[in-house]
Amino acid sequence: MTQTFGTALRCGVIGLGMIGGGVAVSLAKSGLAPTAVFDVRPAAADGLDGVPSPVDSPSAVADASDIVLLAVVSAEQAHDVLVGEGGILATRRDGLIVVLLSTVSLDAVRGLSRLCAEQGAVLLDAGVTGGGRAADNGLVVMVGGPDETVARALPALNGFARAVVHCGALGAGMAAKLARNAVTYGQWAVIHEAASLAAEAGVPLDRLLEVFVKGDDEGTDRLNFLKLLVADEPLPPAQVDSADHLAQKDLAAAQELAASLGVQSPLADITRARIRAVYSGELEQPLPEDRHERGLAMMDRAYGEGFHKLVPEGPATPSMAHTVDQLFASVWARPYLTLRDRRLFTLGVTAMLGRADLIETQLRGALAASELTVPQLRELVLHGNYYAGWGNGTILQDVVEKLVDEQDS
């Protein structure tokens, strides 16, 4: 079936929950009332002003639409709506635009896009934020997809959104949404950690809130560093040094307070290790594609800049080639565990072996990455005594105190 575009864009909506229902209402308010909608709940459109009763299948929505706005919960549901029984792609849909409003992985976006392309349709990924205002043209839409397709879809997107941002090619909209979500959830987690610390120290939480509300200024704007990155205006090195020194002092004091109160402060630990990169505007760079180069780069991340230069290479050291190409390129570089997670696990195993040389390598890497403070190093010794035995714990302690002395000298 070939979609025909008239002067008025025909919009369909699938999924009439908080987002999809709000989108349908906003379209009606904007004069682009949906020509067809679908939801697994027959009465889903009840109470949605200007929204027609649901048709009997996603395919029927596609038959009546030039653009279908897909607002389901998961990638699995999106897949079923596209190719399941009575799905959007039950017949060929040349020219149809499918706009995915759901938050899913980039792999899912690419897979769904391929399914659409096989039937002549085009998928746009369009992460949204502001769901509570969906029915009042309150969504911000982050779109990924070809320029021409986004331009064709823009009247419909503007019909329900207060802002539409074309972030780039397919997947870019979803990447922007996921990045934004990371900031949102990260903020909540930081506030929770801060509230726990303040409450245990005897600060009423309403007083903490008052401090944040009355003390907020441009210098603490959560987007301040992103604005500097956009403007390509990195802080001067001397200012980075000064800001990092101050942050290290303040975060160390927060860690010490948390430790004295028995409150966990994992986010402060992570922030202290990464804050210099924040101030300097250093974005995390992907590892090289070449496996050997990837392994060498991962070694530097694990043990400090330039560590890979210490690695002997050549036909006489095949085991080292496997260490670089397999252990570091294929294991240490995997996701799911942070570098610090892998280091602590490796350190525990190494302590069980009683190998002072291997322990020192791991701890030097931890110090180079600012992953562990001196109190944390000494806490590792105490913990290790009980799990690795007091003899091995003594070996761990000797290495720790050697490194602490080096830092103090």
Image: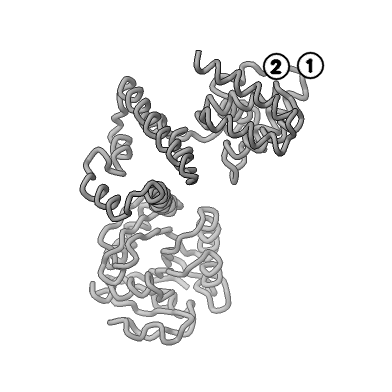
Q: Amino acid at mark 1?
A: Ala
Element at label 1: loop
| 1 or 2: mark nearer the eye | 2
Q: Can residue 180 be seen from the camera position used here?
A: no
Work out whether residue 51 or residue 379 is closer to the camera in this orientation and state it.
379
| Within-10-Å neighbours for mark 2: few <14, some 14–19, many 20+ | few
- Rendering coords of residue 64 (x, y %): 40, 78
Identify the residue under disc 1.
316
Q: What's the CA distance linking mark 1 and mark 2? A: 9 Å
Q: How is the image coloured?
A: one colour
Which residue is at a point 32% across and 53% down the rendered structure image?
A: 204
Q: Amino acid at mark 2?
A: Pro
286 lies above or below 84: above
Which residue is at a point 40% across and 69% down the rendered structure image?
A: 69
Element at label 2: loop
Work out whether residue 64 or residue 286 is closer to the camera in this orientation and state it.
286
Q: Is residue 152 left or right of residue 123?
A: left
Which residue is at a point 42% across and 59% down the rendered structure image?
A: 124
Q: Is residue 332 left or right of residue 214?
A: right
- Rendering coords of residue 263 (x, y %): 48, 46
18 lies above or below 183: below
Q: In the image, which disc is placed on residue 63?
A: none
* Count of numbered badges drawn on the protein: 2
Q: Is mark 1 in CB contact (under 8 Å) with mark 2?
A: yes
Q: Can residue 195 be seen from the camera position used here?
A: yes
Q: Quadrant of residue 216?
A: top left
Identify the residue under disc 2.
312
Which residue is at a point 32% across and 40% down the rendered structure image?
A: 226
Q: Quadrant of residue 334?
A: top right
- Rendering coords of residue 280 (x, y %): 37, 28
- Rendering coords of residue 168 (x, y %): 39, 48
